[in-house]
Image (spheres, rainbow, N blue to C red):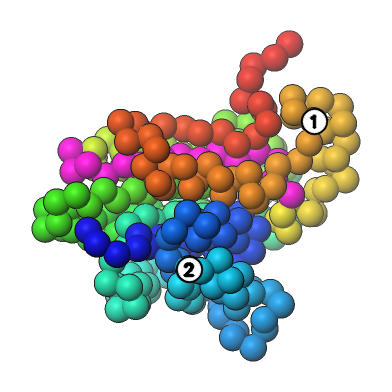
Amino acid sequence: MDGRPVAFITGASRGIGRGIALALAREGFDIVGNATAYDPEQRDRGLAEVKARVEELGAAFAPAPGDVADLAGHERLLDAALARFGRVDVLVNNAGVAPAVRRDLLETTAESYDRVLAINTRGPFFLSQRFARYFVERVAAAPGFVPAILFISSISAYVSSPNRAEYCLSKAALSHAAQIFADRLAVHGIRVFDVQPGLIDTEMSAAAKEKYDQLIRDGIVPQRRWGTPEDVGRVVAALARGDFGYSTGQVVTVGGGMQIPRL
């Protein structure tokens, strides 16, 4: 297909999503950035700030406000992207939340469980289903079109945190969703990847920063530092570019070596 490729990124207003948007803009992608809200007057933060940064890099940016947990809004999100750019090449499922209150496993509430799973797992699953249907149609109609779906899960997909069990379960399910989508969509030439960030310095991790600072000093991260949204963005850019064209279903950990079994 002719023209610039387009990436649709959920949770693009800050943190890892922001880092991914900037990395893909540098690689020549136009960006559709999703978040729950968009205020064009708040130029110092949120989607408006990311929009300005993306445009400074020479890419176009279309804000797409909406809640990924609202399944009825998924069609509107895709339609908005196609109306602006006429295509989407990459879906990045990045939006996610931590529990509003960290509670011990024995105190986990159904309300918190339902909220976290709705945003972190249920929403991305059905959004990916909708985009996958579009990708299958475009692959059939446009030879040479090679789309991709990326799931931003977490090392929490396999590392236990008993004070946020619902988060761990949501990311484990999301990680396996990536495998299932990769299996189903490979026949159509659609690549699917699971990117698992480790300890990334963002607003989400700020609530436990003192704890994680100490763990990093004690060596829980072999590289002995926090990760950054830019670290994740560079990995996503390589996958989205097609550098790993004969790979799908791969799990890529961006955690400074935390996935290494150690004594």
Confirm whether the magenta stretch covers residue 244: no
Query: Residue 28's quadrant in the figure?
Result: bottom left
Q: Residues within 10 Å of mark 1 (few under 14, many from 20)?
A: some
Residue 163 place in picture, x, y as percent: 72, 43
Secondary structure at badge 2 equals: loop
Q: Is residue 136 left or right of residue 124?
A: left
Q: Which residue, given by chain and number where applicable, does mark 1 sit on?
A: 224
Segment colored magenta: 187-201
Name the residue nearer the viewer: 14 or 5: 5
Q: Is residue 97 left or right of residue 32?
A: right
Label 2 amino acid? Ala
Residue at x 14%, y 51% (from the top left corner): 143
Secondary structure at badge 1 equals: loop
Residue 31 place in picture, x, y as percent: 45, 66
Q: Which residue, given by chain and number where applicable, does mark 2 sit on?
A: 59
Compared with residue 222, is residue 49 higher up or lower down, i.e. above or below?
A: below
Query: Residue 3's quadrant in the figure?
Result: bottom left
Residue at x 22%, y 58% (from the top left corner): 1
Q: Is residue 35 visible?
A: no
Label 1 amino acid? Arg
